[in-house]
Amino acid sequence: MATGALLALSSAPHFRGASLARLPPLLLGPRRSYSRDEALSQYLHRSPVPTMHYQRSLPRLPVPKLEDTIRRYLNAQKPLLDNDQFRKTEELATNFGKGIGRELHEQLVSQDKQNKHTSYISGPWFDMYLRARESVVLNYNPFMVFNADSKVDYNNQLIRATNMTVSALRFLKTLRANILEPEVFHLNPAKSDTQTFKKFIRFVPSSLSWYGAYMVNAYPLDMSQYFRLFNSTRLPKINRDELFTDESERHLLVIRNGNFYIFDVIDIDGNIMKPSEIQAHLKFILSENSPVPAFPLAYLTSENRDTWARLRQELLDNGNKEALRKVDSAIFCLCLDDFPIKDFNHLSHTMLHGDGTNRWYDKSFNLILAKDGTAAINFEHSWGDGVAVLRFQNEVFKDSTQSPAITPQSQPAAVDSASSVQKLNFKLNDSLKEGITKAKQKFDATVKTLTVEAHQFERGGKDLLKKHKVSPDAVAQLAFQMAFLQQYGQTVATYESCSTAAFKHGRTETIRPASIYTKACSEAIVRKSSKHSAAELRQMIAECSKYHNQLTKEAAMGQGFDRHLYGLRCLAESTGSPLPDFYQDQAYAQINYNILSTSTLSSSAVSMGGFGPVVPDGFGVAYGVHDSWIGCNVSGYLARNVQEFVQCVHKSLNDIFNVLEGEQVN
């Protein structure tokens, strides 16, 4: 596979094969007749290439060579350790590579050969998420905000909620009918993204189709995660959670003021209900005057997973089995908030965590709409990664804005919403009430310690950086290294997420942006460690860019070191023997304690995103390099000064641009 072809995949942010089961056929009751236009409006499009056409022939995620992994690991450790620490870590790594590490690697390769239907990281990665006992809120669930509709009057909460719901259902139907356009990265779209090529490739057998795409520089992506988008929930269990999916259910879950409502959005024929009926039901829910319950159930999904598992069992034992099943099996969760968005920071807090009453954080995703029509997705991360969610957001945004199901002039259908919309009631005993109260106290206390700060750097972006022949992503990452050095005087473990969706059941790999090159460049510009000419500084930035591009290509090709070492560690742990010395090295713990956790995304449908820090004294840095500006959205707890870090990022970008444009560095 051509290495350069996968570079763009890294901009995607944090199995079983996708089920293509149709919705249940008509069992009883009268059929509703649909016109041709109505039938077509049930789908987003009709791809000539079946959705899962490439899945069978996708290349497998490679297990890197052990010597390459150890070399890359040591390269990433160099900027983080002093000479004595590095010598010790180098010795441990070398011994590991020659001894127990070699045995574990051969075992991993052997296991991988026996499991050709999946990737070596898929099982351990699901385990990593599902065994984690921390709250999914702030620790795992990220959010991504939709752009506003360019037609201002379509941003009304009811209109936009209706249109986005219908577009989401069109996506669901198109996916399950196997006519959703397969996800493909086109290196030469003039050849591969054409009707001619698609009509040709559909006749190439699935076992060979990937190779046909590869011949024209197109790279199909793994789509095994997509079926979990709908009718799915993460269920809390003691020690390890479970993922639950029930594709037979036809209802939507709506939460407003902490109250739960359900109504069918797919009829018994498997057709999307009339948009005017969905509009009527949502209008009915928005007109309901039910106050927030004294004990809002949603707080429980923000709890420690074992605590939540015990409380959930108590809920089931207390007569709530049917109500919980309706929540878990709903197509997705629509959250209607009763307030407008004030500013970027309020937007981040609202979409990242909210007030705890109006989300079901365990659903595969929550579609959130504020009072002013601002919309976002908050998604549970164990089932899948940004590639699947971003594709869904792109399609929903495009369809809901270009082919809206209703207009501001549309009238809700004259239907009996009071009987069609069911309000879910939960039976709570004193123990459950106490559990909810404690969950609320914990949630409120944690959220109070979180700061989120958004910033836009408007001096330049992708266009200007490409003119200077440097990687836009590398420059953003260099700015974060410089900012942390400026603020705290050190270089720390840094994580950048990179998709490996070009491989069957690929998940993510880590790019390690902190390198000897970024450290030297940061010290030269921030500390002015020695007198460098403008030309030398430009050369240093170019070296950072070149090395970062290499790391990005390696990660996208499944040639990072993090997942490989993690897979080997999981094997070592499974034996019950003490962990090898390599894994007990303080330097190994330190590089996996990611104080700077970063992720970028690029989409015309999404304006911004964000996530919490992954360690108590870390920063969560969501960012995007746009054509003419650079944006970042930074989160942190009390241990860090978020506003000051953002100011340091701004200064660092300014300094980099000064160097590139031949101006004096301040």
Image: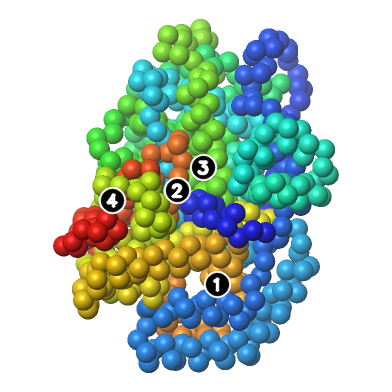
Q: In screen coordinates, is 638 left or right of 312?
A: left
Q: In screen coordinates, is 490 left or right of 420?
A: left
Q: Nearer the viewer, mark 4 or mark 2?
A: 2
Q: Label 1: state its secondary structure.
A: loop
Q: Earlier in the sequence, mark 3 or mark 4?
A: 3
Q: Earlier in the sequence, mark 3 or mark 2?
A: 3
Residue 204 vertical placement versus 13 (above, below) = above
Marker disc for residue 627? none
Q: Are marks 2 and 1 in contact (CB under 8 Å)?
A: no
At 43% across and 91% down in the image, what residue appears?
Answer: 87
Distance from the alpha carbon under mark 2 to that under mark 1 = 22 Å
Q: Which residue position holds label 1?
A: 561
Amino acid carrying label 1: it is Phe
Amino acid carrying label 3: it is Leu
Q: Which residue position holds label 2?
A: 601
Pointer 2 local density, CA inside 10 Å: few below 14, some 14–19, many at least 20: many
Q: Which residue position holds label 4?
A: 452
Amino acid carrying label 2: it is Leu
Q: Are marks 3 and 2 in contact (CB under 8 Å)?
A: yes
Residue 283 vertical placement versus 394 (above, below) = above
Pointer 1 local density, CA inside 10 Å: few below 14, some 14–19, many at least 20: many
Q: Which residue position holds label 3?
A: 390
Along the line of sight, which residue is nearer the eye, 243 or 489?
A: 489
